[in-house]
Amino acid sequence: MQNYRPPIEDIAFVLTDLAHLSGVCALPGHEDITPELVATILEQAGKFASEVLAPLNHVGDVEGSHLVDGIVSTPTGWQNAYREFSQNGWTGLLFDSQYGGQGLPRLVGVAVQELWDASNMAFSLCPMLTQTAAEVICLQGTAEQKKIYLEPLVSGKWTGTMNLTEPQAGSDLSGIRTQAVRTPEGHYKLSGQKIFITYGDHDLAENIVHLVLARTPDAPSGVKGISLFIVPKFIPDSDGNPGKRNDVRTVSLEHKLGIRASPTAVLSYGDESGAIGHLLGEEHRGLEYMFIMMNMARHAVGIEAYAIADRAYQRALDYSMERVQGYSVGSKNTQKVPIRNHPDVSRMLVEMECQIQAMRALSLYTASAQDFVSRHPDDAKRADSQVIVDVLTPIVKGWSSEVANDIASQGIQVMGGMGFIEETGMAQYFRDARITTIYEGTTGIQAADLVRRKLISDRGAMIQKVIELIRRDIEDSNAKNAPEVLSINMGTMNGLELLQDSTAWLLDSERKDPRLPFAASFNYLMLWGIVAGGWQMMRASSIALKYIEEKHNTSFYSHKVLTSKYYAGFILPKTAGYYSAIVNGSELLMDAK
């Protein structure tokens, strides 16, 4: 199996030069965090990812997790890896020290998360969901709930899940039937079934804290009648230790295409006396609270996407340099060459690499905006940053996951027949990547969110703010008059103009037929992703040129300029196709049967 090489140098460049690390570290509460500390954290995380988690990735894929006699067992080596992961403090990276965390910015957490996802995506889902569950309790829980649950979750002694989906309620949560009945003691008893619960049961931690969407008996119909409940696997005793087993039963584990080691459970609540749960926040506001978790998870899936894409790229690149086939086109040399030398293989590899860099940069840029939203002292800066987060989050999730699937497929293509063989490892990346366009909201749902909530809701005001931000950055780069960045600048500006025209078309079409913007939404999201990726690659190349002039690590920065040119040459031209599909194809769907 392939070794994992954490892309620390590129992550560090993006953090420092594109994602405003110095500004994030200057925020209230982060003043003690230095670039040197962040560099050490990245180095240690990369070491743990490559030496501990990566070797277990194939093991987990082959063995999977199993349910036998009511007990779920994870693959060989996973318990020890999780114990070491928790003891090293990785679960609590982002949380306040009063709960045992390290209080680091979300920007740093996103950078580290890529390393977990790339080395072992199925493993990384457990701490990721635990962190999102802890975040919801931190923001909406009572003092007593925080006291009981936050420290064990932050330490990793307990893990967390999110329970939304039911057999009849998937993307439409208005159909949720799980019931929560208040008892005289003040808690609730839940009954119902939840499906597709990631890490719904396992043997890694002492307890599992489920956040469950359910209805009270007098709840209004639809999503406005949903409440959120904390339902632990083991009910904490008076000292906060796991006590009596709650009435939560694991019915089965799903047999999945990918992420096979991650136990995806069907959970039954209240088969006997009712599962004891505690209301989180206020009744009937459950979906609102769950969206705190959902938005974090959506960004997290975007991270998974480019992380697994990078793993596929590394595998394909290694193979392309090892596999000797044929002669170099146009050369008189009679010696056969590695397939990396053949133009079409080279094309696939450069397309993979430049898109991974663009996705990484866009994700980390979005993460820094999240930090500014939560901690910046200036109201206007927080508001502007919130616009960036709102607009870019569905793009980071939707566009990145679609591109990651393409990259994983290209990885197989580079390897040819060997890529199609399970034992070479590439097939696992292809299978694991497939879920990223589906869970935490399909690409279609991300696209609908972008159009409904970020475009139509305010007649394009939010969207226009981000478009103007991109336009200003292009103009700033053009002012430097550097020929090396001309292609990426022009390509990004051309794409931006198509995006501007598409935005106007969607707003106008909504007046004609409210279905039209949603017929165009997927292509609009993909157009947005390519332009936003070009924006970040343009910024990267402009900064890289400055470092080259100053004689800093010219090899790395010269390659950064080159990958930006690849993006301009191979990826940005696709904007014309998406634009055409929006304005010429969307209306055709109105008559589709």
Image (cartoon, grey):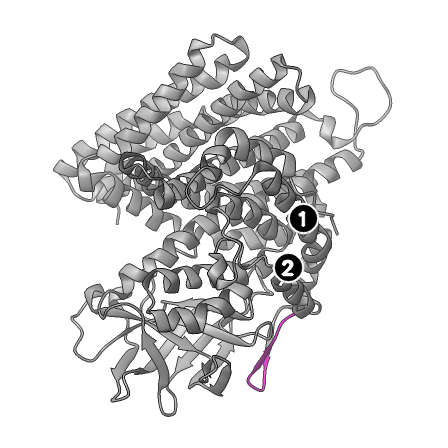
- Visible residue check, residue 19: no
**Disc on the earlier residue, 2 or 1:** 1
The answer to if 3 sits in the magenta stretch is no
Q: Which residues are magenta?
A: 67-75
Relative to residue 393, is residue 354 drawn left or right?
right
Numbered label attached to residue 44: 1
Residue at the (28%, 25%) spot, across then down:
500
Q: Secondary structure at mark 1?
A: helix
Dot 2 falls on a residue whose secondary structure is loop
User: Which residue extends farthest bottom?
Assistant: 272
Image height check: is 155 above or below 30? below
Q: Amino acid at mark 1?
A: Gln
Q: Residue at x 56, y 39 (%)?
A: 34
Report whether 192 appears left or right of 513. right
| Residue wearing tag 2 | 88
Q: Which residue is depicted at the point 59% across and 59% down?
A: 89
Give the amino acid at mark 2.
Answer: Asn
Q: Is residue 345 left or right of residue 387?
A: right
Q: Is residue 68 magenta?
A: yes
The extreme left residue here reads 511
Where residue 17 appears, as percent x and y from the top left, is 52, 28
Q: Is residue 425 above or below residue 231?
A: above
Q: Position of residue 72 (x, y in %)?
A: 58, 78
